[in-house]
Image (cartoon, rainbow, N blue to C red):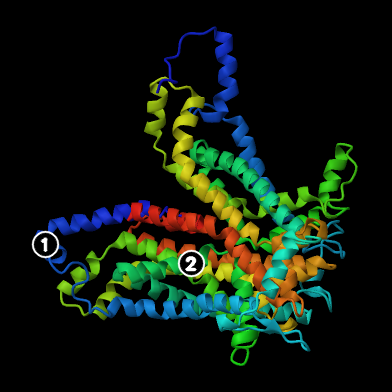
Amino acid sequence: MSEITLPSPPSSAAATTARTRTSWFGNPWGKPRFLKVVTWGYLAWSILPVLIAIVFSFNAGRSRSTWQGFSMRWWYQDPFDSLWTNPALRQAMIQTFKLSIVTVLVAVPLGTAFAIGIDRWRGRPASTANFFMLFSFVMPEIILGTSLFLLFTTLVDELVKLGTTAQILGLVTFQLSYPVIIVRARLLSIGPEFEEAAMDLGATPNQALRKILLPMLGPAILASVALVFADSVDNFVTVRYLSAQAPTEPLSVKIYAAARSSPTPAVNAAATVMLVATLSVIGAAYAIYRRIAGSRGEELGAPMSLGEL
Amino acid sequence: MTSGSTPGARSRQVASGTAEATPPRRGTSDSGTGRGAWFPRWYWPSFTLPGLLWLAVFFVLPFYVVVAVTFGTVDELFRTPIPVYQPWWWSFDTFSDTLQRFFVGDRIYLDPLIRTLLYVGIASLICLVIGYSVAYYTARHAGRWRGLILILLISPLWISYLMRVYAWQSLLQPDGYINDAIGIFGIAPVTWLAGNPVTVILGLVYGYIPFMILPLFGFLDRIPQSVLEAGRDLGASPFHTFRRITLPMSKPGILAGLVIVSLPMFGDYYTNDLLGTQGTSMYGNLIDFAVNTQGQTPEAGALVLFLIVIVMLPMLYYLRATRRAAEGSA
């Protein structure tokens, strides 16, 4: 504490310059103009390119960098190359939704059960299992993608071939940790008192689980559904390595391939579809969540924790 | 990461409040046999089993396959990998060949490795500087804009990474809007996409900075205003308050953020594929090339094993930190 001295009255001019120089740095009461510029500048930098890319899906010409007038050509009007009429892009769109929906259906129940299990079980085996789960969460995706690629091309290549099944198995492996983390965070806050109370009142273990614990986990499960779906739609590394030929490539892989050759604004349209799909699922989940939370009078904490994951 | 703690702590209080209202029940549940006394011993472990099996088959087993492929051989005719699962028959040829490409002879793998370390380091630092400023402003000064800023900060997480990089690729075209914009100031058009390290580094920053801002915001937002006021009341200058209170209290957030952004950067190959050339290729590009080249898969295995070694320390650090945070909030 020796460095902190009481403010002696220096010459006022020096104090003013010192203040303006450092005010943005740490004064919670000052006006941080510099930080304000950085923050809004960052937000513009982060959002504007995406908005411009969306606008260019309505470009009349082939270019994705020079505006040539408005048209719906790349959405459905062009007889061969639009998102709707091009068979490859349409196939990719279907593949994206197929993979994401099945992944949600497998990963969320599996992850939820896992989270309930390790949280209520406790003990050493449970924490070891949790460690492996978290390990799969922080591992760079290319490691997981390559190792699954090698698994499906060597050891089990008779059983599971590269393609939709392999992609789903890979996606579930990669996404499994999200429901585990979200549901477990909720479980930590609920505590075991509620099931215990239910069983005191005569419920069987299964009844306590179904009627007490699962409804209380509702918001967390809902958040997991939204997150896993959104992340599966956007997934690229895993699904690319595990895709067989062109028909099993989802939109993200098509965007990557097109971006490296000669993309048309139909690619922008494809990316926009992915964005809209993701945002509508998030929006729907949030709306349902608000209804549940509103009817139970709970506070709205989940969206933020979703983002921080 | 740990924001679940706030609502968590609250409902926990509610829960124990209910329990205190009915003391006898609390007594029975806490004494003797402990929690979950009425659940059969196998009840909770059986929930864990499916997920555990899944991890064993699709997470742990593939690693052994990577090892077996790396230390296996390649079919002479079809150039397909032949994994060898018995350690006593392992051949270390691929492994040492790959290692030699880093440090012996023409060292064709050394440049990508050095570039990766350099790019990841610079990009992570830029993420930290911009991210800290943004998180600080949002936590302290955003005022009535706070909600909107938070939504905008989270929104990149919902936008496909590829779309975001693709958007930049379009803007950076020779006839793109960025060159138009700098043309206004009389600057000649820049060839952004012809192997320009600045483009690749900024692309990495652009892609991963949201993962830096959110944990930083979490930590900065939790510093109580009263602590800062106390510092100021005791005569600390704004700079001192920052250096001796805010900075130490946000240090876990800084470390977590640095780990979270740098880990995926080590395996990133698509940013360079879209924004750079061979001259800016990174470690991820080496793996990607080996995976996609017939006969090179054992080498892909070796490269993946090296990458695991490189990222192991930051990964373990991150796991330890999150576990501590979870225990703290539980």
What's the amino acid at mark 2?
Answer: Tyr
Image quarter (top left, top right, bottom left or bottom right) of the C terminus of chain B: bottom left
Please give the name of the residue rendered at 48% of the width and 54% of the height, measured from the top-left corner.
B317
How many marks can you see?
A: 2
Residue A68: x percent and y percent?
87, 59
- Residue where numbered disc 1 is placed: B27
Residue A28 location (% of width, % of height): 48, 30
**Residue nearest the observer in this picture, B270 or A142:** A142
B327 left or right, relative to B67: left
Rate crowding at label 1 as few (under 14), some (14 to 19) or many (20 or more) other CA atoms within 10 Å.
Answer: few
State the CA–CA distance, disc 1 to disc 2: 36 Å
Specify the amino acid type for callout 1: Gly
The residue located at (89%, 37%) in the rendering is B186
**Compared with residue B132, is residue A82 higher up or lower down, i.e. above or below?**
below
| Quadrant of residue A113 within the rendered picture | bottom left
Viewer-side residue, A81 vs B15: B15
Say which element carries label 1: helix
- The answer to whether residue B290 of the structure is visible from this angle is yes
Q: Count residues near mark 2 (Cα–Cα under 10 Å), then give few for <14, some for 14-19, many for 20+.
A: many
- At 61% from the left and 80% from the top, the residue drawn is B90
Q: Nearer the viewer, residue B76 or A243?
A: B76
Badge 1 and badge 2 in a common chain: no
Question: Chain for mark 2?
Answer: A
B112 on left or right of B310: right
In the image, farthest residue toward the bottom: A158
Circle 2 sits on which residue?
A178
Residue at 39% of width from left, 68% of height from top?
Answer: A128
**Secondary structure state at the residue bearing disc 2:** helix
